[in-house]
Image (cartoon, rainbow, N blue to C red):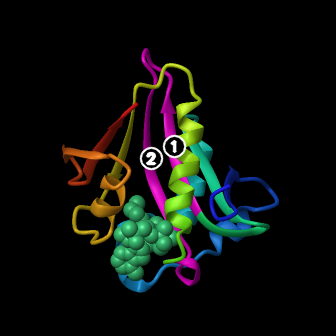
């Protein structure tokens, strides 16, 4: 177990806790609000929203998509830990959890992740897992990939 961190589907029981997570004002530009992401996930069948738990407490949220092509493709495009719970290793542990979940999907050859290039922590954080930047997409977001 990674610091007691696990990820779970967003449900009728936990979505309010996910929606209530907050970021510092200067971090809000780095990721869409959780309320927006949850709404989006309801209309995008490829979206896989996940609550991040420590014990029984929801501390964060992430979302990846699964495009069922041949081979299937996946991008982690939302990732946040609530501001009161940051800096305790939960983000690192949660990323390990989602990478493990994605690795179990048959046929996945690589995992993409995207982030705003001026996010000070993102590049170093994802690079430490082996993600390699491949360039910006049409919206100016950096794409990094991890080959499996
Ligand atoms: C990025 C984020 C998810 C990291 O979560 P966290 O639980 O605070 O991270 P951890 O404690 O596991 O630390 C992981 C790494 O994040 C970085 N980090 C964490 N807190 C940081 C801080 N206050 N300032 C700068 N970097 C920090 C460090 O590089 C750290 O690396 P280390 O393990 O080598 O020390 C969290 O800061 C966050 O939600 N940020 C706002 C949203 C965002 O930027 N999301 C990512 C882009 S989608």
Tell me where the magenta segment starts and ends, as one range: 61-86
Give the x, y percent position of residue 48: 59, 43
Q: Earlier in the sequence, mark 2 or mark 1?
A: 2
Depth check: 42 or 91 in front? 91
Please name the residue that numbered disc 1 is placed on.
Answer: 99
Quadrant location of ligand 1? bottom left
Q: Residue furthest right?
A: 13
Is residue 74 among the parts visible in the rendering?
A: yes
Q: Indicate yes or no: mark 2 CB to ligand 1 under 8 Å.
A: yes
Left or right for 130, reference 73: left
Please name the residue that numbered disc 2 is placed on.
Answer: 76
Depth check: 74 or 127 in front? 127
Q: Quadrant of residue 51?
A: bottom right
Residue, x 49% and y 19% (percent of image)? 107
Vertical arrangement, residue 19 with respect to residue 107, above or below: below
Give the x, y percent position of residue 148: 40, 30
Left or right for 71, reference 84: left
Looking at the rendered structure, which numbered label has been put on residue 42?
none
Give the x, y percent position of residue 21: 60, 74
Is residue 33 among the parts visible in the rendering?
A: no
Inter-mark Cα distance, 2 to 1:
9 Å
Q: Quadrant of residue 140?
A: bottom left
Element class at badge 2: strand
Element class at badge 1: helix
């Amino acid at each position: 177990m990674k610091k007691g961190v696990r990820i779970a589907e967003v449900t009728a029981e936990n979505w309010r806790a996910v929606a209530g997570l907050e970021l510092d004002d200067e971090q809000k530009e780095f990721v869409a609000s959780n309320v927006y992401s949850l709404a989006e996930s309801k209309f995008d069948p490829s979206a896989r929203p996940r609550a991040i738990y420590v014990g029984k407490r929801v501390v964060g949220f992430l979302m990846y998509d699964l495009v069922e092509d041949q081979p299937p493709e996946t991008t982690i495009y939302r990732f946040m830990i609530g501001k009161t719970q940051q800096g305790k290793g939960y983000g690192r542990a949660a990323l390990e959890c989602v990478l493990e979940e994605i690795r179990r999907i048959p046929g996945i050859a690589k995992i993409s992740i995207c982030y705003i290039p001026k996010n000070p922590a993102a590049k170093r954080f994802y690079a430490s897992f082996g993600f390699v930047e491949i360039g910006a997409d049409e919206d100016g977001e950096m794409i990094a990939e991890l080959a499996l």
